Image (cartoon, helix red, strand yellow):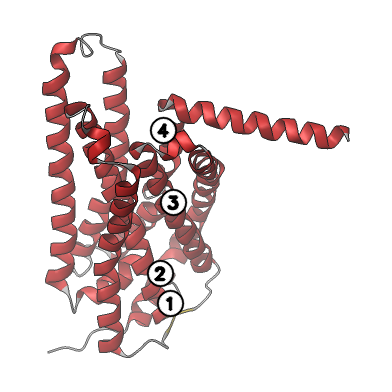
Amino acid sequence: MTSPIPISNITQEWVEIMQKWHLDLFSIPTIVLTLATLLASPVLLVSIFLSRALRQETRYLLLANILVADLFLVLLNLATVICNALRAPMQWLGCELVTALTVTSYCCAVYTVTLMVVDTYAAVRWPLRYRDVIPPSRTYCILVGVWVLAAIYPFTVMIKTHVASGNSHEKLPVCLVLISLGFIQDRNVTGIYIYFFVAALMCSLLISYCYIRLYMITRTQGIWHSRFSRARVTLLAHGVLLLLYFAPGFLFTLELVLIDRKDIPQDVRVWVSTVNMCVFMLLPRVFAPYLYGIRYREISDTVMLLLLHQHRRLSQATAA
């Protein structure tokens, strides 16, 4: 049985390929997309938490959870990209922790997006019982459960790998989730595949079922007749956003499957991983706050009131 290649050797080869193709330039779109997210998501979060009416709505609490998970992910991703571009060495344990936190944030956002679809279906299907079945207090418990569900597997794998390998003090030239999970994968192949496959399958089936049932329930109400009806536009917007949320995960899983394939050049893997991490992973985080800020009138009105109040306070301070 051949001994595994040290992870420091793998990351060093990765660095050489990034330097050859000047892939550090992808830090520019990463910074731009992250800044665009940081401009909008905190404003929506503040608007939701400052408004008592919005805090009583399950859909807005779910949206707030998505925004929190997205902010956590983009900040982790930005820190990782900058550290990799500066070639700041990181201990293997730190890279494992970043990997577990990144996977947790991504899975939490995807789970909550799925719950938003289920919540919409429940509100349409049982409009009279909806508020009694899912009050805000129960929604908070559900969100805590989502974070626990998203965190339990990656952190369990991280702890098991750390105990088994014992190389936590090894320094890495770059920290990449793909390489970290690919290295862990040698010890937990079946578990990692099952986790990602079952999670993606369950979310996809739930979303598909809810949308099909929503269409069947509402098709006789005339909201689908117009080509540019609000229902069609909303469905299209949510469909695109769901695709943007799920696509990086599927691409990442494909990268894990192909990471040990000898017939695929390493340069191709480095390119795909870099584009996925620096662009595709960030696109839904950029679009979500702007889409939901426009889609939900209550949020847009609250944001406008918040901005007007802030502008009034600045004007009074300047006049004084």
Q: Nearer the viewer, mark 3 or mark 2?
A: 3
Judging depth in this view, the residue of 277 and 258 nearest the camera is: 277
Amino acid at the residue labelled 4 = Tyr
Task: State the SS at label 1.
Answer: helix
Q: Which residue is denoted by mark 1 in the rendering? A: 94
Image position, residue 51 (x, y; %) = 51, 37
Q: Whole-Å distance between the Cαs marked 4 and 2?
A: 28 Å
Q: Which residue is denoted by mark 3 in the rendering? A: 68
Task: State the SS at label 2.
Answer: helix
Q: Which residue is denoted by mark 4 in the rendering? A: 292
Query: Which mark is first along the chain, 1 or 4?
Result: 1
Judging depth in this view, the residue of 211 and 169 nearest the camera is: 211
The residue under the point 25% across, 43% down is 115
Image position, residue 155 (x, y; %) = 30, 72
Amino acid at the residue labelled 3 = Val
Q: On the image, which quarter does residue 185 sit in?
A: bottom left
Q: Nearer the viewer, mark 4 or mark 2?
A: 4
Q: Whole-Å distance between the Cαs marked 3 and 2?
A: 17 Å
**Label 2 packing within 10 angstroms: few (<14), some (14-19), many (20+):** many
Amino acid at the residue labelled 2 = Val
The residue under the point 25% across, 61% down is 149
Image position, residue 196 (x, y; %) = 19, 59
The image quadrant where one finds the C terminus is top right
Image position of 18 with respect to 138: above or below: below
Q: Which residue is denoted by mark 2 in the rendering? A: 98
Q: On the image, which quarter does residue 237 sit in?
A: top left
Task: State the SS at label 4.
Answer: helix
Q: Which residue lies most toward the right here? A: 320
The image quadrant where one finds the N terminus is bottom left
**Label 1 packing within 10 angstroms: few (<14), some (14-19), many (20+):** some
